């Protein structure tokens, strides 16, 4: 990892969904910027790869396997962070799944519930247990990963789209509730980004890949590292007056 400016030097940071994609890139960047990072994911094998990369670059890191849809596991995760680093300064709540690909009236209820429980319920549970820890110290920053699909429609991905729209409402509400308590809460809304989840989605059908690329004004997918830069800034003290924001990082896709 390249030497950075130390935007989060010494901060204890949690990143969920950090095994691959945007979560992995965010954990690596935060560590490169001087943070002490807790990597969390349900995919332990891939997450250990993130941990190894941080350690090999000289960063400070811990790992805790967590299913964010399970409240008891989320409680254990936050306890682990505090026990390991003595505090929790920032959290990037990034864990999520794509959910089923089907039009609304063909979505199976089990798939709907699973997607909402992971994407929306996971962020709710993480914030529920992160916020009190930050309130005690009178400061903290939380970044929730939403999506461009949290702002505009995503035909054929109703559960995903609904969960990402709801994340923005949850983020804004929590931001206002905590504005006088020193805890900033924002969301990032990535556009189509080159991650394993996106590659799996595009592999469903050649027409899906063409549709996604057509939606990108620059003619390319975003890179996970580009999304991570936004999360880093929102975690840093340079974003000290930013809260309740839904930051698009999408190469102009939603502006079309």
Image (cartoon, grey):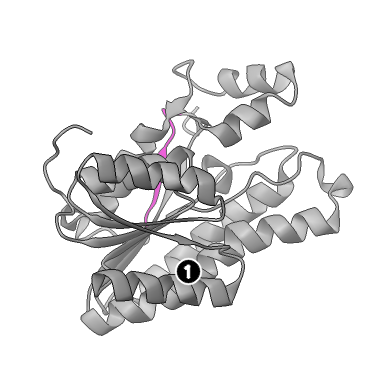
Whole-percent x and y of residue 52? 35, 43
The kind of secondary structure element at disc 1 is helix
Residue 136, image quadrant: bottom left
Q: Is residue 249 magenta?
A: yes
Q: Quadrant of the N terminus?
A: top left
| Label 1: few (<14), some (14–19) or many (≥20) C-alpha neighbours in 10 Å | many
Residue 81 versus residue 167 in the image, above or below: below
The residue at the point 22 percent across, 48 percent down is 59
Whole-percent x and y of residue 29? 28, 42
Left or right, 70 with respect to 124, comes to right
Q: Is residue 19 visible?
A: no
Magenta stretch: give its range.
245-252
Residue occupied by mark 1: 126
Residue 176 versus residue 213 in the image, above or below: below
The residue at the point 44 percent across, 17 percent down is 218
The residue at the point 43 percent across, 64 percent down is 172
Name the residue nearer the viewer: 184 or 75: 75
């Amino acid at each position: 990892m390249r030497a950075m400016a130390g935007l989060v030097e010494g901060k204890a940071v949690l990143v969920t969904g950090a095994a691959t994609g945007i979560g992995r890139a965010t954990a690596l960047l935060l560590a490169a910027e001087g943070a002490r990072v807790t990597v969390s994911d349900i995919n332990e094998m891939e997450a250990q790869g993130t941990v190894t990369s941080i350690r090999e670059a000289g960063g400070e890191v811990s790992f805790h396997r967590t299913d964010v849809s399970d409240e008891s596991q989320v409680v254990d995760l936050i306890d682990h962070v505090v026990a390991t680093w003595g505090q929790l300064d920032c959290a990037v709540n990034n864990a999520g799944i794509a959910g089923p690909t089907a039009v609304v009236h063909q979505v199976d209820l089990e798939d709907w519930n699973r997607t909402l429980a992971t994407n929306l319920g996971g962020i709710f549970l993480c914030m529920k247990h992160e916020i009190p820890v930050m309130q005690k110290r009178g400061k903290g920053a939380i970044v929730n990963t939403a999506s461009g699909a949290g702002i505009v429609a995503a035909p054929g991905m109703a559960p995903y789209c609904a969960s990402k729209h709801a994340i923005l409402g949850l983020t804004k509400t929590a931001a206002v509730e905590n504005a006088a308590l020193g805890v900033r809460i924002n969301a990032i809304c990535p556009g189509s980004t080159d991650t394993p989840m996106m590659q799996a989605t595009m592999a469903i059908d050649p027409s899906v890949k063409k549709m996604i690329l057509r939606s990108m004004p620059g003619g390319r997918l975003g890179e996970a590292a580009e999304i991570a830069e936004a999360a880093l800034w929102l975690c840093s003290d340079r974003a000290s007056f930013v809260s309740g924001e839904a930051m698009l990082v999408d190469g102009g896709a939603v502006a079309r």
